[in-house]
Amino acid sequence: MVAEYFVAKDFVGYYYIIIPLFIISFITGIALLRPMLRFMKAEWSRVDVFTLLLSAIGLAYVIVSVYTLTIAPMDDTFLDIAGMAAFSLFVIACFYVTIFNVHPKNVYLFITGAGYMFVCMGYLIYELVFKATILLALVNICEVLAQFYFVLYLIHIKSIVKSKFQRYL
């Protein structure tokens, strides 16, 4: 919430405060998903590997494209890489659980991962490239939905961990 306040106040002026706060936020999100990540066992097939590789290439392309378009001129490579790494790991963790555990409530994590992808990319584009009110409205709606579904998932995570070996895998 503090980082979002600084984003709304002045993104460029508070950049060196905003990025570390978002890094902490994404690392905390990964830590909260740890119960699911610890008990997950991925069973890979050729289709899974191909799909995962194609998705990783697409995600990397989008992140690098938005980075070079928006943040690269700010010239703080270490902070940028740390922020992109934390963001990418959080999104990957969300999609990893969604892919390899078929519990019905895992759709909440899919919505969270997709929502945060749009939020982070949309905020950067809005603040540094193209100030459109509709873009900001969509980003804010996606952020509320992503946060809501992440909290909803965390509320049910104990029951998901207990039931995953009984009925869903």
Image (cartoon, rainbow, N blue to C red):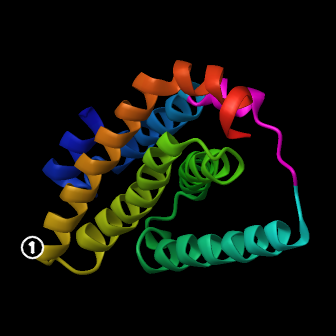
Magenta residues span 33-43
Q: Quadrant of the rendered structure where residue 88 is?
A: bottom right
Decide: few, some or many residues near mark 1? Use Cα within 10 Å; few <14, some 14-19, many ≥20.
few
Q: Picture coordinates of residue 140 (x, y %)?
A: 19, 56
The amino acid type found where label 1 is placed reads Thr
Q: Is 42 part of what is drawn in magenta?
A: yes
Nearer the observer, 77 or 69:
69
Q: Is 46 part of what is drawn in magenta?
A: no
Q: Picture coordinates of residue 79 (x, y %)?
A: 55, 49
Does residue 164 lie above or below 92 as drawn?
above
Q: Residue at x 53, y 51 (%)?
A: 87
Q: Picture coordinates of residue 71 (x, y %)?
A: 44, 68
Quadrant containing the N terminus is top left
Q: Is residue 54 left or right of residue 17?
A: right
Q: Is residue 42 left or right of residue 147?
A: right
Does residue 69 lie above or below 91 as drawn?
below
Q: Residue at x 47, y 75 (%)?
A: 66
Q: Residue at x 32, y 73 (%)?
A: 125
Q: Is residue 123 left or right of residue 107?
A: left
> Where is mark 1, residue-wise?
133
